[in-house]
Amino acid sequence: MMKSGRFLGALAVSVLLGAVPARVASLSAAGDAAAGGIGADGVTECTVAAVQARAPQGTTITSAAVVEAAGKVPKYCKVDGHVATPGNEVNFRLGLPVTWNGKFIFAGVGGTGGNIGSLDAGLTRGYASASTDTGHLASDTTWGSNRAKEIDYGHRGTHVTAVAAKALTASYFNRPPAHAYFNGCSNGGRQAMMEVQRYPGDFDGIIAGDPATGTPMQVGRALVFQHMLAAQENYLPIDKVELLSQATLAACDATDGLKDGLITDPRLCTFKPQTLACKGADGPDCLTGGQLETVNRIYSGVKLPGGETYTSGFPVGHEGGASGWQAWTIGKEPPARQADGSLAFGASPPSGFRLSEQNMRFLALDDDDPQFQWRALRFPQDLPRLKTMSEILSPRDTDLKPYKNGGGKIIIYHGWADPAISALGTVDYYEKMTRQVGGAAQAEAFSRLYLVPGMHHCSGGPGPNQFDMLTVLEDWVERGVAPSRVIASHATNGTVDRTRPLCPHPQVARYTGTGSVDDAANFKCEAPAR
Ligand SMILES: [Ca+2]
């Protein structure tokens, strides 16, 4: 089956986007005032007509209305609209606060897009704040059969929204934003990596949290599910994951030099799942052969026939808990046998299954095949069929020199215990990127990677999982203060019970030997001894 618009190559797309006029550059207060629609405060009226009159070409405003202050969110002008792309329209929302901090921020969106992200965090800090649905509605079940919508989800929708929303911000306030930032986690982290790789001029500061890797990640999941759902004895029930989690913590907690309930560097851990193998029949204190193979697949990742990593395995540690493997891989309920004899999850499958199933069904293949699903994937035989979509969805370019040379700064963070997207893949990317830009000093001139011990996917887990990277990035971009340690905290029921510095990779937080291990003051960042 053909996908509409599939012959639009990257070159044609970039030429078309390049044709959008640089509205910011051509702004003049006198010219805009002459166009009308300027209020007594010198700011554009918050109406469709006034905002549309100053909109860049290809941008359609569908709604503009003042929203009164509520809670911490200040009074702002809420603008909804869409941007035309070749073969599609990308919906966006832009919030323009009455008391503006002079800057712009873009909020990334999770999963497979389809919903515009919340602007509240940016508006609360006074930012002109934008987000996008990445070019399709959540209710649209056919977007994965439309190449234009796939490209917009993959990367283009974020870019055109950034260009249009920055221009609208400039025309609304009659001056361009002094700085433009992007902040996203998970798929939002993937959007961030696409921006830094493909559109280095869009932002001068980018935060990429737990960045999704697109096709390789979904293939890795599918291969785990192929084994885990092939036989009931391969399935890992919740209590077996808790058993594993206790075993990995017992084996690895002290290997980082401090027994504190956290595995600070899982790469140091030499835990072997085989030590949990059942000696005889299945029991609560052991893993069956089928369960061990499931665990090994999760830890091992996927290698190409030549031995090169295709998708990284998951680091050992903190597998348990509601936001651990349970949320992403095994689910709350075990799979049930279907009429055809197969095992399948019920109505609330684990998130990793839901996303991989959707990906294989309508996003992975270069040409749709309605019969294709995760059980049918053959690795590596099917890799050629995934090539085009992998290029559209997967941010793999390690050459960040254009972004660096343009003065951009990027902060990447990843939870070591993220059960959805492997932190080891992000470490691998960062180290390759470091070599590509000319070594550590060059990489540190514009980038940081923070690995967060014991943090699950973007939040959760027993580690210090709350931190404010935007302030760190603002200090770097606006005041030239290069990031060093970042204080993170962990709270239980709203009460902080642990603080810990996050250290720029490859440094790690080292206990100074005195005082509470739950107090960041008693840690320093230093290069690992190995
Ligand atoms: Ca430890």
Image: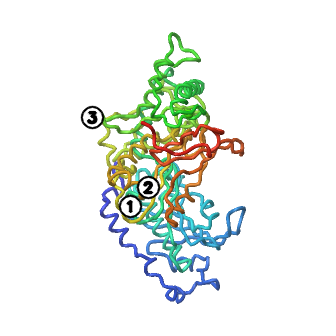
Residue 137 pos. (x, y %): 52, 56
**As drawn, 59 above or below 403:** below
Q: Are marks 1 and 2 in contact (CB under 8 Å)?
A: yes
Q: Nearer the viewer's eye, disc 2 or disc 3?
A: 2
* Residue named by callout 3: 306
Residue 360 pos. (x, y %): 42, 41
**SS for dot 3:** loop
Distance from disc 1 to disc 3, alpha carbons, whole Å, reads 32 Å
Q: Kindly identify the residue that appears in the image at 36 percent across and 53 percent down.
A: 3
Q: Kindly identify the residue that appears in the image at 38 percent across and 61 percent down.
A: 404
Q: Quarter-wise, where is residue 408 in the image?
A: bottom left
Q: Nearer the viewer, residue 38 or 367?
A: 38
Q: Are marks 2 and 3 in contact (CB under 8 Å)?
A: no
Asked if residue 139 shows in the view, the reply is no
Horizontal side of 151 relative to 28 (left or right) equals: left
**SS for dot 1:** helix
Q: Is mark 2 within 8 Å of ligand 1?
A: no
Horizontal side of 67 relative to 12 (left or right) equals: right
Distance from disc 2 to disc 3, alpha carbons, whole Å, reads 31 Å
Residue 196 pos. (x, y %): 41, 58
The mark that comes first in sequence, 1 or 2, is 1
* Residue named by callout 1: 404
* Residue named by callout 2: 447
Please name the amino acid that badge 3 sits on: Gly
